[in-house]
Amino acid sequence: MVTDQSPEAPLKTVRGCRLVTLPDNTDPRGSLTVIERGQHVDFPVERVFFVHGVPPQAVRGLHMHRELHELIVAAAGSFEVVVDDGFARATVRLDRPDQALHVEPGVWTEFAGFSPDALCLVLASAPYALDDYLYDYDEFVRTVRLPRAGAVAGLVGTDGPGDRHLDTQTTERPLGADA
């Protein structure tokens, strides 16, 4: 049996996330990596932030967004992103600036294993809004597994097998639980 060793392999079981290859233009002067709306990111970018200086054992994220899309890039160094759709979980290592991870609404994320030089760049589809975050993992799992009639705004699904519906209002933010 041949095992899929491609970078995308861990994501095949988790809905709502995918790797995006970014063009990397390199010449003797260095490298230039490009992210363009419509080509590499299919949502309007309303906020950009970066995470850096993360202590070796720290875990960031630990939340899910109700409506926000994110494009996550290791602009420098490396780190791991755990993605979880409530049914399947995978870990993706980001260690190249020409590879990004698109995370759709309804996916739980955790960031860990930051190298000392890591620079995590995130392009987000909306300004910061506390009510877009869900920080309780158990509630996240219960919510995405609920069979409900109709789709909830911001998520795809019509109550077929495996459809996700998020309508919880838990926004309490645990200490250090942001990206």
Image (tube, grey):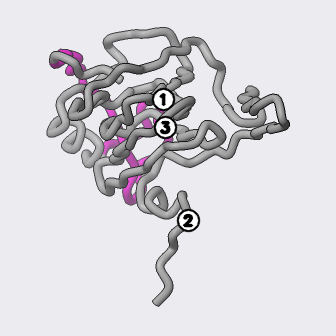
Residue 135 lies, in percent from the top left, at 22, 26
Between residue 46 and residue 30, name the one nearer to us: 30
Between residue 112 and residue 17, name the one nearer to us: 112
- Say which quarter of the image contains residue 8: bottom right
Answer whether residue 56 is visible to the viewer in this image. Answer: yes
Indicate which disc, 1 or 2, sits on the residue closer to the N terminus.
2
The nearer-to-camera label among 1 and 2 is: 2
Dominant secondary structure (helix, strand or loop) of the stretch shown in magenta: loop
Q: Which residues are magenta?
A: 148-174
Name the residue furthest right. 27
125 lies above or below 5: above
Which label number is shown at residue 103? 3
Magenta segment includes 165: yes
Whether the residues at callouts 2 and 3 have beta carbons within 8 Å, the answer is no
Residue 55 lies, in percent from the top left, at 26, 26
Answer whether residue 72 is visible to the viewer in this image. Answer: no
Q: Which residue is mark 2?
A: 6
What amino acid type should be assigned to the residue bearing mark 3? Val
Q: Which residue is mark 1?
A: 154
Question: Helix, strand or loop at disc 3?
Answer: strand
